[in-house]
Amino acid sequence: MWLDLSRIIETPGASLPFETELDAALLASDAILSFPVPPTARGQVVNTAGLLDLHAHIRGRMRCRCDRCGAEFERELDQPVDQPLAADLPEDSDSDAYPVEDNGIDAAALLESCFLLDREMKTLCRPDCAGLCPRCGRNLNEGPCGCQPTPDPRFAVLEQLLDR
Ligand SMILES: [Zn+2]
Ligand SMILES: [Zn+2]
C-alpha cells in the first residue's frame, strides 16, 4: 500500500492517517501457522517539527505453535509500531529511520518488516510452558511422566562414595 506523504512532508504538525492489510502469507512462519483474523495495520504518519514518524498498531489473530511443547494455540495480535522515517537519508547513514523515496513509503512493506523484526523470538503457549519430557516425549503441562530426572553427574560420584 503506497502512502503518499507529499502533503505532510514539508508541514510541521501535519499528520496522515492510514489503514492497510498485511500479507498474512509473508508473516507466517514455523511458529505462526495462520491468521484466523487477517493482520491489518492502522495508524498515522506525523510530522513533528519537520521529522516524520509512523505510529501504528498491527492487529489480528494468530494461530501459533508452541516452541517448547508443540501445542497449537490462538493468540490476539496487537503489536505497536513506532518507526521514524527520513526523506534525505545518506546512503552510508547508520540511522534506523526508514527511507522515504519519491515522497512516499510502502506502508504495508514497512509494517511487515517491523513485524518480522520485532516478533518475540520465542512463541510459547504460556510463559511457564513446561515443554516435553526429553526421554518419553510426554507433554509435561499435562502432568509429570514418571521418568526419573537425569541424575546430575556430580551426585552420581557422591552416591558412589556413599555406597562404599
Ligand atoms: Zn507449550
Ligand atoms: Zn518422561
Image (cartoon, rainbow, N blue to C red):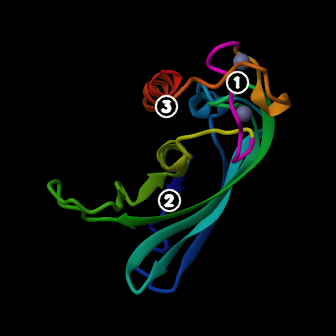
The disc labelled 2 sits on which kind of residue?
A: Asp
The disc labelled 3 sits on which kind of residue?
A: Phe
In this orientation, which residue lies closer to the viewer: 126 or 24?
Answer: 126
Q: Is mark 2 within 8 Å of ligand 1?
A: no
The residue indicated by pointer 2 is 4
Other-residue count near label 1 (Cα within 10 Å), few / some / many at <14 / 14–19 / ≥20: some
The residue indicated by pointer 3 is 155
Instruction: Give the CA separation, mark 3 to mark 1.
Output: 32 Å
Q: Write the residue at 51% across / 42% down.
A: 116
Q: In terms of secondary structure, where does tag 3 sit? A: helix
Q: Which mark is residue 41?
A: none
Other-residue count near label 2 (Cα within 10 Å), few / some / many at <14 / 14–19 / ≥20: some
Q: Write the residue at 76% across / 46% down.
A: 60
Instruction: Give the CA separation, mark 2 to mark 1.
Output: 43 Å
The stretch of residues the image draws in magenta is 126-136
Q: Write the residue at 39% across / 64% down.
A: 85
Residue occupying the far right of the picture: 142
Q: In terms of secondary structure, where does tag 1 sit? A: loop
Q: Which corner quadrant of the image does residue 22 belong to?
A: top right
